[in-house]
Amino acid sequence: MKAILRIALGLATVGLPWLAASAQEPSSLTLQQAVKIALEKNPLRKAAIADTKAASADVREARSYLMPHLSFSETATRGNDPVYVFGSQLRQQRFTTADLALNKLNTPLPLGNFTTRFGGSWNLFDSFASWHRINRAQQLNDAAGHQLDRTDQEIVFRVVSSYYEVLLAGKQLDVAEQSANTAQAIMERSHARFDSGLAVESDLLTAKVRRAARQQELIRARNNLELARAQLNSAMGMSLESGFRLTEELSERALPVAALQDLEKQALLNRPDLKRIASEKEAQRQTVSMAKSSFGPRVNAFAGWEMDNPTFLAGGGGNNWLGGVEVQFDLFQGGAKRAELSRQRALEEKAAAMQQAASDGVRLEVRRAYYDVDASRQQVEVARTAIAEAQESLRINQDRYDSGLTTITDLLGAEEAMRRSQTDYWEAVYRFHSSYANLELASGSLNLQSPVVMP
C-alpha cells in the first residue's frame, strides 16, 4: 500500500504542473472568432436588441387600439347619502313602497352595496388615427432593426481595428527589442573603441544615452501591447483580464477595392443608418396623418353589465345592463390641434432635410475612406522599399564606424533611420487593414464574411 501511495504521489507531482500550465495556456483567437464573440457578448449590441424588442412591443400596443377593451371591477360601498341609498335599492331590486316615505327618502339608514361589473368599449372609427398609429409603430420598429444592423457593423469595425492594433503593438514590440539590441551592440562597439583609444568618451556616452532611450521605448511598447489586448477584450465584450493568443500575423494582403462610384451607390442603397433615417421619416409622415385625423369624428361603442347585492357572499340583489354608441366631434379647442398639425409638418420637413444631409455625409465618408485605403496601400510600398535601404545603410555605417571612417552621430542616425523605417512599415500595413475595414463600414458592407475579416 505504501508503494502504491508513493507511485501515485510521484505521478501527481509530475502531472500537476503540466495541468496547471495547460490551464494557464491562453486559447487561440482568430479575427473571425473575435468578431463572433463580439456579436454575441458586446453590451452595445445587447442594448440595440433591447431597442428592437421595445419597438416590437410598441407595434403590439398600437394594434391593441383596434380591439375591444374589456374590464372587470368589484366595488364595496356603504353610506347614508339619500341619492346613493335610493339608487342602490333600485339596482338591488329591493325597492318597496315603504321606501317612498319622506323620512326614509330624506334621512335613510346606512345601506351597503356590493357591485360586480363587467364593462367594455370599442373604438369603431377614429378617422383612421389608429391605423396611422400602427403604421408609425411599424416604421419605428423597422428603424430599430436598421439601427441594430448598423450597431453590428460598428462592432465588427471596432473588433477588426482592435485586433490589428494588438498585431501592430506586437510588431512594435519586436522593433523595440531589435532596436534595443542594436543600441546595445553600438554601445559595446563604442566601449571597445574607447578602451583601445580609437574613440573619445563622448562617443561612448552618446551610445549609452541612445541605449537608455531604446530601453524606455521597449518598456512603453510592452505596456502598449497590454493596453491593446485590453481594448480588444473590451470590444469583444469580454473581461479586460481575458487572455487570448492571436493566431494571425500582421502582413500585407491583397484586398479587392471597387470603383469609387460603385462604392457610393452601394452605400446609398445598403447603409443601415440611411434606412433607419428613411423609416423615421416615414414614421413622421404617419404622425402628420394622425394629427390630421384628430379633426375627424370618432365613433365608440360601449356596454356594461353589473350585479348589485346587499352582501358580498349572499344574493338577494339585482342585475342590469347598458349599452350604446356615441359619436364625438371636437368643435373647438382653442387652435391646439392646428398648432399640433403645424408642428408635426415642420418635423416632417426637418426629417426630409436630415435625410438629404445624411446621404451627403455618407458619400463624403465613402470618399474619405476610399482615399485613405489608396494612400495606405502606396505608403506600404514606399515603406517596404525604405526598410531594405535603411538596413543596408546601417550595415555600411557600422563597417565605416569600426574602421574609423565615420562618427558615432552618423551611426546613430542610421540606426534611427532603420528603426523608423520598420515602424513606418508596420504602421502602414496596419493603416491599410483598418482603413479597408473603415471603407467597408462606410459603404455598409462590413460583416462577418467581409474580406478583411476572413482569413
Image: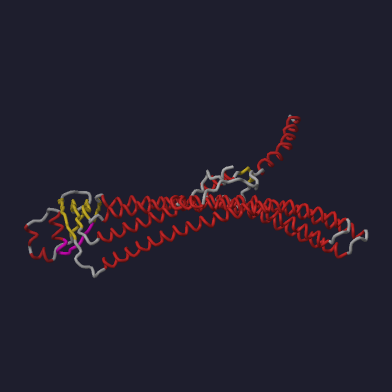
In the displayed orientation, state which residue is furthest to the left: 97
Q: Is residue 306 left or right of residue 384?
A: left
Quarter of the picture holding the N terminus: top right
Residue 116 visible, this orientation:
no
Residue 290 visible, this orientation:
yes
Q: Is residue 393 left or right of residue 316?
A: right
Expressed as whole percent of the image width and height from the top left, the position of residue 116 reads 22, 52
Expressed as whole percent of the image width and height from the top left, the position of residue 377 reads 61, 52
Please report the bounds of the magenta region as a residue range.
76-84
Based on the picture, tell me whether residue 263 belongs to the magenta stretch.
no
Question: Which of the pair 69/297 is nearer the observer?
Answer: 297
Which residue is at 60% across, 54% downward?
231
Expressed as whole percent of the image width and height from the top left, the position of residue 96 reads 8, 56
Question: Which of the pair 382/318 is nearer the observer?
Answer: 382
Q: Is residue 236 left or right of residue 222?
A: left
| Number of numbered labels in the structure image | 0
The answer to whether 109 is drawn above or below residue 318 in the figure is: below
Quarter of the rendering containing residue 223: bottom right
Quarter of the picture holding the C terminus: top right
Which residue is at 57% across, 56% downward?
372
Expressed as whole percent of the image width and height from the top left, the position of residue 415 reads 77, 57
